[in-house]
Image: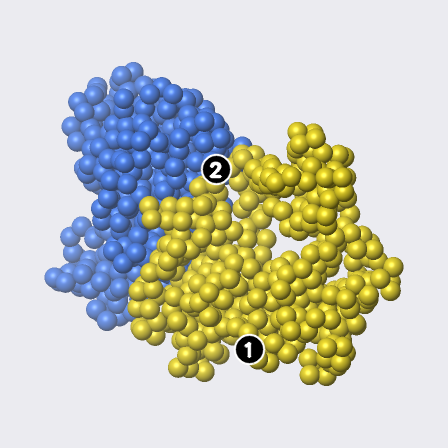
Chain colours: A yellow, B blue
């Protein structure tokens, strides 16, 4: 008899009909003999509606009270699913974040789970109950209600699976799993059977649509196998798990893109210690998250260029900061471009297959796509290109790395090796 | 520096604009120097919406889960009001029933408050905070969320006022106070400056529109002065308080009516011990609440009639029970009439002014209104009449007892004495 944590997202519980469908799915699993903890999000749209309600009251709503308001979303869905299960003759019980013993720090709206008091849930499991837990929420050591931020229900599910030593954490969503690239951009995208935590993290923006990144970190840290699958079909999903020998053989797992960034370049920065620190301290003080950073290779006449990308919504703000800092440090002009895209190639096997970067650059060059910045990590290569080439770049790279084929059918990279 | 508990009903917090108006009112009171605990209902309509949501899932929703669902209504309004107050620069904090230490029994949907752990609220008061508490909800000794039933927020407010030894409990609603009769039925209805707990309780259905009866019982038991007033005007309200010498002088305080009852009569019941018990045991076993009960005065040939009233919605069910019981006890036929109304005259001074009943009967007789049942208590006389005469009866009785005049201007009863 396995202990399984299942999580259903907002679209899966959007209305009474769908909640009943989730109840069916849970009930069938229960009948098969498993013990179940079910984590739910708020109905899709409810969190946005509650945020809007708060903003009607204040342009800058108090964060503690915003969390009290937001936490009602999941409290509604857990009650409704428990009702549906009871109506079908199954013994179910709902638990809010507080009742489920999910203790966080006090960072309202983006709290982190400190620990989980597992006794309340385990007691109900031992009584034979299906436990339905509110995702996204917890409470701090003074009993204040907190929320974990967007996608927080995934984190609740994985954290619960870790704390309860569950055999599996299943994340039900509105897609069938993790794909080699966005199927909306390229129809040849292929669903992955499994993927490592590391690759999933590197998939960043694309992966985050499927599974919240913090939950992947949690899964990696506590070795929780996470199955991502659709709550609307019975198709097998994608298993996110620790890397194994088989995965190592796969050179490239996926291609991702991100159109939400903007690039800023400061020219003629004095090539002296502390200059980069000065720039990035000023930017992070303004609460802007930097993504890629590239410092021009070598200096000319004691001067160098510094380029970086920031979220597109922070572009203008950051541009002004950059201009100010450039003036202070006696650097040159500041250039920027908000119409860029980041294309990334990700794969564990990259570590042992050196041909990936050159294949990527050649493939893009063949289409006359200019590379404005390049950044690499151990299992990921990212290029900044003109936004208008995004879809083209995704398609040609997907073809070049033969991602439409199953890993064992691909040949090219192995040959190059 | 007084400690005041204020309660605002659903219409007072129905939208952002009204919540801000409530915040203004609370803020002004705070500026005047009082410590404040504010109890809120859910936004008007929200409780019904949540009930409907539950019924979409199940025709007979699990009561525990229904309370989890319903409790979200007040959690939303307390967050919104606290945000509004913080936005205005006042230190406010919201508390759910759980956080506020409101401990109830486990009768889901109609729980009763067992006790209130006052420390959490008092701590916040001592920190100078305005404490905003979710009405209508509490939790049992196992941490399950419970709700107190319709009008439960009034009970929360009065119970908190009692537990915190508050100087006053103010109930803000959409009417200006308690009137001598329903102003919609008779435009001469006059607002009362004060009324005793006992009279308020006897006003039953009419009073309950203004103030939930259980909260009046609480107020009476713990001597909490309750002020009922409008959240939309600055008009003075009605004080519900313990009776005093001045009140004793007022013979009649108000006229109420109730059109939600039906009458049933069992004829020729054997006039032997235990017969009435048999009838009413069968009815209460069916969960029907009896109101008036009249047993025919004296027996004829060892037989008597038993008449009683029940909620109109339970009429048919009760009629069938009565027929069954009548057959079992060898009684006669069962008659019934669902088109009746109960008219009541209420007043503390009745106890020392014997002319009230005869004046009531004479006044109704003058209009050819037939009395089908009469029932009296120490401070109330009720008559069952044909439903169609309800409004006429209210008007002529209101005139006869001169309720449009201030108590000291009335003369008639005193003369009759």
| Labels in figure, total | 2
- In the figure, B368 relative to B139: above or below? above
Q: Which residue is mark 1?
A: A244
Q: Nearer the viewer, residue B108 or B374?
A: B108
Residue at the limit of the structure toward the front, as seen here: A301
On the picture, is B91 further left or further right than A126?
right
- Residue at 55% x, 74% y is A243
On the picture, is B281 further left or further right than A48?
left
Image location of residue B212, percent across then percent down: 33, 41
Image location of residue A360, percent across then percent down: 77, 66
Dot 2 falls on which chain?
Answer: A
- Residue at 22% x, 32% y is B165
Looking at the rendered image, the quarter that the N terminus of chain B falls into is top left
Image location of residue A44, percent across then percent down: 58, 56
Q: Earlier in the sequence, mark 1 or mark 2?
A: 2
Residue at the limit of the structure toward the left, as seen here: B273
Q: Nearer the viewer, mark 1 or mark 2?
A: 1
Q: Which residue is mark 2?
A: A62
- In the figure, A191 relative to B274: above or below? below
- Residue at 60% x, 67% y is A199
Q: Nearer the viewer, residue A320 or B303?
A: A320
């Amino acid at each position: 008899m396995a202990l399984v944590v299942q999580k259903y997202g907002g679209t899966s519980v959007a209305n009474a009909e769908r909640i009943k469908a989730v109840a069916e799915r849970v009930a069938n699993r229960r009948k098969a003999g498993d013990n179940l903890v079910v984590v739910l999000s708020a109905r899709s749209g409810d969190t946005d509606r509650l945020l809007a309600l708060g903003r009607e009251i204040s342009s800058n709503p108090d964060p503690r009270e915003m969390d009290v308001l937001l936490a009602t979303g999941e409290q509604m869905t857990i009650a409704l699913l428990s009702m549906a299960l009871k109506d079908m003759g199954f013994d179910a019980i709902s638990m809010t974040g507080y009742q489920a013993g999910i203790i966080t720090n006090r960072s309202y709206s983006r709290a982190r789970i400190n620990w989980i008091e597992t006794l309340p849930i385990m007691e109900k499991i031992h009584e034979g109950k299906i436990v339905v837990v509110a995702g996204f929420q917890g409470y701090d050591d003074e009993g204040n209600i907190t929320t974990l931020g967007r996608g927080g229900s995934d984190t609740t599910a994985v954290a619960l699976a870790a704390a309860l030593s569950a055999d599996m954490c299943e994340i039900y969503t509105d897609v069938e799993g993790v794909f080699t690239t966005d199927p909306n951009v390229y129809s040849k995208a292929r669903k992955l059977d499994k993927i490592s935590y590391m690759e999933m993290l590197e998939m960043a923006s694309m992966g985050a649509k499927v599974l919240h990144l913090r939950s992947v970190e949690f899964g990696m840290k506590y070795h929780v196998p996470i199955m991502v699958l659709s709550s609307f079909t019975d198709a097998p999903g994608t298993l996110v798990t620790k890397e194994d020998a088989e995965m190592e053989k796969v050179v490239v797992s996926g291609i991702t893109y991100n159109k939400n960034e903007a690039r800023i370049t400061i020219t003629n920065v004095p090539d002296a210690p502390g200059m980069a620190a000065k720039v990035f301290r000023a930017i992070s003080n303004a609460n802007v998250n930097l993504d890629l950073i590239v410092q021009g290779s070598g200096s000319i006449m004691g001067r160098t260029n510094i380029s970086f990308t920031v979220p597109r919504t922070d572009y203008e703000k950051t541009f002004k900061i950059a201009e100010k800092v450039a003036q202070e440090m006696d650097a040159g002009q500041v250039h920027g471009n908000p119409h860029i895209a980041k294309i990334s190639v990700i794969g564990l096997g990259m570590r042992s297959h050196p041909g990936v970067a050159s294949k990527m650059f050649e493939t893009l060059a063949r289409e006359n796509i200019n590379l404005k910045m390049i950044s690499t990590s151990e299992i990921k290569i990212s290029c900044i290109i003109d936004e208008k080439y995004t879809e083209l770049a995704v398609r040609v790279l997907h073809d070049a790395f033969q991602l439409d084929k199953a890993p064992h059918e691909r040949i090219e990279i192995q040959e190059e090796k």
